[in-house]
């Protein structure tokens, strides 16, 4: 498997990894600059020449995976018999610098409701490196020609047409997915709020709407839904930056996306 395919495989499986590259070579070394190795939790693909250099790189890569490190790291090696190595002697005579670049699991966002605001939000979020799930009960809003505006997306876009029970998609979402609820139907929104609170492993939960809408929803979630106050308070509403008050779909979308990106940054802090 090529290193490109290995990186794609890790992303598809939502597994972290580290891309290891021979950055510079002086003198003799097992591999030339540019040689690559992909390290996962339990497997590797490719090679940077074997021996101590590769073994140390794999050890360090797995330490980075466990620690969820996000910053790249450069390691220098001297390949001579005067150096004490962790995994044996390499006496090619040269020096090698190896770059380790973390490949974290990309974030996932699910937008329930791809109407005017939902589509504008998808256009903004599609410029981010994430898994973007678009969910709607209406086939026309998910039509290929309507979603063609996402054809150059950086994100991996997943479309879910759920004519009857959109809340069933919640159970299929990757662990940690951030959920934004903005369907065309308040009853559907309410069912999704209830189901999201019952679905373990989700990230943040956001609901679009007015204060009056939330008063009704909150009372229903507490009484009919049987949720306690702490659980119900996981739902953030209104969503978006409070100091952006425009009501145009594109304005709301930018506000919501900016608020979500701030949530991402707070996770890293």
Image: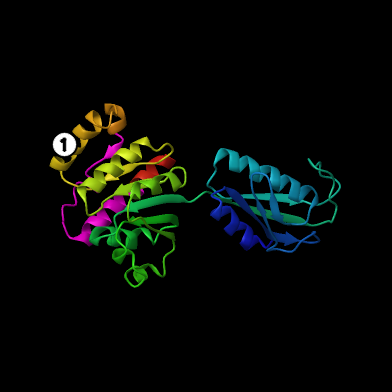
In front here: 124 or 195? 195
* Magenta part of the chain: 233-261
Q: Is residue 210 above or below residue 230?
A: below
Please determine whether, in this image, residue 2 is positioned above or below residue 70: below
Front position in the image: 174 or 140: 140
Residue 100 visible here: no
Place of residue 7 in the rendered image (x, y in percent of width and height, measured from the top left):
60, 57
Image point 31% across, 70% down: which residue? Answer: 146
| Residue 254 within the magenta-colored segment of the rendering | yes
Residue tagged 1:
215
Residue 31 magenta-highlighted: no
Q: Residue at x 80, y 42 (%)?
A: 87
Q: Residue at x 76, y 61 (%)?
A: 31
x, y percent for residue 132: 41, 56
**Residue 22 x/y as whole percent:** 69, 58
> Which quadrant, please, contains the C terminus?
top left
Q: Residue extending furthest left?
A: 212
In-front residue for pair 187/245: 187
Residue 156 location, quadrant = bottom left
């Amino acid at each position: 498997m090529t290193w490109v395919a290995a990186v794609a495989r890790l992303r598809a499986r939502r597994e972290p990894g580290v891309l290891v590259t021979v950055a510079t070579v002086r003198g003799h070394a097992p591999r030339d600059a540019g040689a690559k190795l992909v390290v996962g939790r339990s497997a590797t693909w490719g090679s940077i020449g074997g021996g101590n250099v590769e073994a140390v790189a794999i050890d360090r890569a797995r330490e980075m995976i466990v620690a969820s490190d996000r910053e790249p790291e450069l390691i220098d090696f001297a390949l001579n018999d005067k150096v004490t190595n962790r995994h044996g002697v390499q006496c090619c005579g040269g020096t090698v610098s190896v770059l380790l670049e973390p490949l974290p699991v990309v974030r996932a966002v699910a937008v329930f409701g791809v109407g005017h605001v939902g589509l504008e939000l998808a256009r903004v979020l599609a410029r981010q490196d994430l898994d973007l799930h678009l969910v709607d009960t209406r086939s026309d809003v998910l039509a290929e020609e309507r979603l063609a505006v996402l054809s150059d997306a950086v994100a991996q876009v997943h479309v879910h047409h759920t004519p009857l029970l959109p809340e069933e998609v919640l159970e299929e979402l990757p662990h940690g997915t951030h959920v934004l609820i903005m369907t065309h139907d308040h009853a559907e929104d309410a069912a999704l709020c209830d189901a999201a609170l019952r679905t373990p492993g989700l990230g943040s939960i956001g609901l679009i709407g007015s204060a009056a809408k939330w008063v009704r929803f909150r009372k229903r979630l507490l009484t009919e839904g049987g949720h306690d106050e702490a659980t119900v308070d996981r739902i953030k509403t209104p969503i978006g930056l409070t100091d952006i008050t425009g009501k145009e779909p594109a304005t709301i979308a930018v506000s919501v996306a900016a608020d979500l990106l701030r949530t991402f940054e707070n996770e890293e802090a």
